Image (spheres, grey):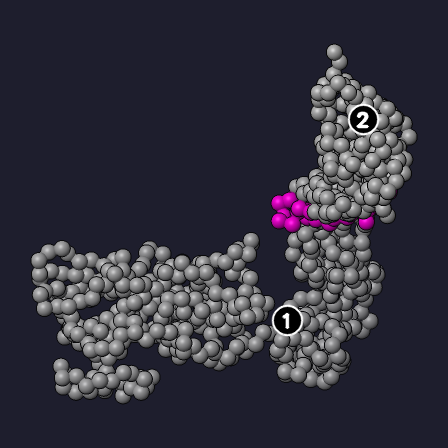
Amino acid sequence: MATYNPKFELYFQDVKNRHFKAEILKKGYDGSVESLIGTTEPVVIEWDGDDNIYSPIRGSRCSLSLMVNENTNYDEFHKSDEREYLLRILKHDSAGYYWESEEGKWDLTPQLWSDLTGGDNYWEPIWTGYIVVDRFKEQLLSTPYEMKLEAIDGLGTLGSFNAPFDTSDTAATKNVFYYVKEILKLTGHEHNIYIANEIRKTDGSANDTIFHDIKVSPYAFFTENLIFRKAKEILEQILKITNSRIYHAKGSWYITSNSNLIEKDIDQLALCPSGADTVVDPTEFTDPTEEVVIPIAKILTNGLDVSTHSFRNNATVYFGTQNTNKASAHDSYVFTLNGSTVKSGGTESPTYSINNLDSSNNNDVVAVTLTNTAGSHADSVTLSHDSSTPDDPEPDEIGGDVIIQCNLIPENAILTPIRAVASYEDHEVGDTFAPTFILSPKAGYQLRAVGNYSLAGVGQTLTISDNSNGTYKITSSVTLPSGGGTFGFSIVGVLEIEKFKTTVNFTNNVSNATLDSSSLVFNSPARPHPDSVFTGTVTLTAGTDKYFNSISDITATIGSTGLVSRSLRLKSDTEVEITVSGEVPEGTATGTERTETVTIAGLVYNDSDATAITSGVTIQSALTVGAFSTAVYNNQFISNPSNTSLLNGRFKVIAIVHTGGTARVNWVTIQLRNNLGGGTTGGNEATRSISLYLSPNNTYSARYALIKFVTLDESTTIHTLTLTQNGMSF
């Protein structure tokens, strides 16, 4: 970071005769310090505010009013670069203030000897900010006149910067304090950060704060289109979720909980400077999912979280547990009854039951202890005998109500019903109650495979199965206890965006060419989901010694459903790429299974020398034209009623001297035409016609040429046409 040194200074006092100093520091300056001349009210510091006490960002500004006369020599501040001048306001306190302070600021504070007060002086910064060029005010009057400079603390400029993003590790989660620190760096200041907030995570590090306890993915600060949010917006979000505000004072950043403002002074240790060069990162708070922590045990009695459970004679009570610390599981568990171990186990879900309770079990204490490598935690419940039912040496079973309810279901899913209730008589105790629950997805979602969902419950048997209609059936089976009871279970798992299957089948009607795939299958969510668009390609490849002459020779016809669009591209003379694309419509009205057919047709041509004229095509062997015939069209010497290719491969058409020599004639021009009527430079299976262009014969003698159809190397003659052009007549 650039070095700032004082260039101007102004000493002044307030109405209570307290000493202050204003310094203007210039970036990279290395010279003497000059005095400023202030007005009657040289410095005014203001903090932004509004009627909303919960506004998270409280920016501040400072106005410095100076006098200009013929002896002053100020810089041209209005021509300076951004952040070239730094305004710092300092307050003078005697040495005794610092030596008596519990915080020990005497060893941290700048010291200087000043003749103004005649002793050791300590100047403590109370405000720092950059001079804003566009708010410079100077009157165009003769001296003396007033000039006003304005500086800001930089919080308002954060709206011009993107949220910080660590490109060295784009997947790592970081605590919120990292983002607060990196955002405050953007102000250009190296202020310390003071935090006052009583909210903390259980077992959090002693020197950390709530901002160290919260960890987030770096992509949480992007828009849904992965566009950077602005740094100011992110800082506001962080402060709002922690009910905090930030402001600048005494040369530091203060982040305080709104509830702390009226409760106590801010006295927490400054954690680190926010500047770019002297950052001291706090110890990174370990992700709870990567750190083994003590499990927090909670005992459930008949599925309920109670500290005392009332029972009647001959009742049965089921005990289960929950580990409310989801970060780490237990390695072992122990159930005790009045301090004596009655059951123990490993990592499985702990369960325990007591049958045939009576008055002798009054005030029994059942406890469970969960243990892992980090430590142990216990919870207990006290049993209370219901004295309204007298003891019976041979008690009968009594009926009651049994309730089975779901405590947790996946997000974006619906369970019907949420709870099932059954009333029963004493003779039904011991029977089975097995209600069925239906798990259904909410609109726009679908359930994953059955194996992706787990069930947990105490005192019951739980099963889950597929109904084959997009829903799952969950059955909870319990044995009816004497006196009734409540049982709970939970479903753990997630749903996924509902997807629709679109199959595009391809029919290839091109002879001597093959497709690399006969179908494409797309699974895409419905609109307006951003992934609703699908696209895919297949390749049509010409066979051995075959080639494609033009993309116009190939067609791809889409079926009538209109699910997809298509495009064709000639990748090479032997490959045609067919691309199909589409978008899944909104909603589910079209169903999840959709099929479209694309039919491919067209021509592929031989890539070898022609050997014969195509069947059905007739080319004359002799042709006589007049002296002034300049164009001879194909219908004068070629019969091609089916508009088929003239020859069965590649060929040339040349005109040579009729006398038997090999010299080419210069009065005949030959043009080959394909099926679209365009001219070609060489003959092939795409050729449908031939045109001969002649120059007029201005002589009285006939002239002759041989129009020869030959192979590409002219080694073999396939057909010969004798051309006679008469001379002029008298």
Amino acid bearing label 2: Tyr
Q: State whether residue 223 appears in this view.
A: yes
Work out whether residue 348 or residue 623 is closer to the camera in this orientation and state it: 623
Q: Does the magenta stretch include residue 523?
A: yes
Work out whether residue 548 or residue 673 is closer to the camera in this orientation and state it: 673
Q: State whether residue 264 appears in this view.
A: no
Residue drawn at x 86%, y 24% is 622
Report whether 253 appears left or right of 417: left
Q: Which residue lies furthest to the top in this view?
A: 730
Q: Quadrant of the N terminus?
A: bottom left
Mark 2, residue position = 704
Q: Which secondary structure, mark 2?
A: strand
Expressed as whole percent of the image width and height from the top left, the position of residue 224 reads 56, 54
Q: Is residue 305 magenta?
A: no
Q: Which secondary structure, mark 1?
A: loop
Report whether 367 appears left or right of 704: left
- Point out which mark residue 326 bears: 1
Q: Which region shows up in magenta?
A: 507-534
